[in-house]
Every structure is written in C-alpha cells, then in structure tokens.
Amino acid sequence: MHILLKLISYIGLLLTVVPSILVFLGQIELSFHKTLMFVGMLMWFLTAPFWLNKQSETEVEG
C-alpha cells in the first residue's frame, strides 16, 4: 500500500510539471493544461501526506 501511495503521488507530481512544458512547446492547449494540473494537484495532495515524513520500520528499530 505504501508503494502504491508513493507511485500515485509521483504521477500526480509529474502531472503538475509536464503539462507546463508541453504548453510552452505548443503541444497542448491551455485548457487541457489546467485540467491536467488540477488532477495532478489532487493526486499529490490526497496521497502524499500519508507517506511523507513517516519513519520506516528499520529506522524505528535501530
């Protein structure tokens, strides 16, 4: 579950960076850019708090 949350978070983070580059290059329209960034923002903020700043089990034991 922890790995899945990280994967979704990183995909959301990519959805906030890549569309900006694509708009700059003229590959996508601004309205589609806004939609992708909104989805990416939701993915990041809904999943990242569950795994960020959490100590791993090996750090707790040591």
Image (cartoon, rainbow, N blue to C red):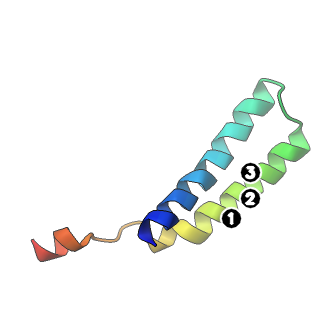
Image position, residue 53 (x, y; %): 36, 67
Rounded to the nearest whole Å, what is the CA distance between mark 2 and mark 1?
5 Å
Image position, residue 12 (x, y; %): 62, 55
Q: Secondary structure at mark 3?
A: helix
Residue bearing mark 1: 42
Q: Secondary structure at mark 1?
A: helix
Which amino acid, mark 1?
Answer: Leu
Q: Residue furthest top?
A: 25
Q: Is residue 40 above or below residue 49?
A: above
Mark 2 crowd level (few <14, some 14–19, many ≥20, 10 Å Cα) = some
Q: Could you tell whether 37 is left or right of 62 in the image?
A: right
Mark number displayed over residue 16? none
Q: Secondary structure at mark 2?
A: helix
Asked whether disc 2 touches disc 1, contact meaning CB atoms under 8 Å apart, the reply is yes
Q: Could you tell whether 40 is left or right of 34 in the image?
A: left
Residue at 54% over, 53% down: 10
Which amino acid, mark 3?
Answer: Met
Image position, residue 30 (x, y; %): 87, 40
Q: Is residue 62 above or below residue 35?
A: below
Mark 3 crowd level (few <14, some 14–19, many ≥20, 10 Å Cα) = many
Residue bearing mark 2: 39
Quadrant for the C terminus, please. Answer: bottom left
Asked whether disc 3 touches disc 2, contact meaning CB atoms under 8 Å apart, the reply is yes
Residue at 57% over, 60% down: 8
Dot 3 or dot 1: first in sequence order is: 3
Q: Residue furthest left?
A: 62
Which amino acid, mark 2?
Answer: Val
Mark 1 crowd level (few <14, some 14–19, many ≥20, 10 Å Cα) = some
Residue bearing mark 3: 37
Residue at 60% over, 52% down: 11
Image position, residue 48 (x, y; %): 51, 66
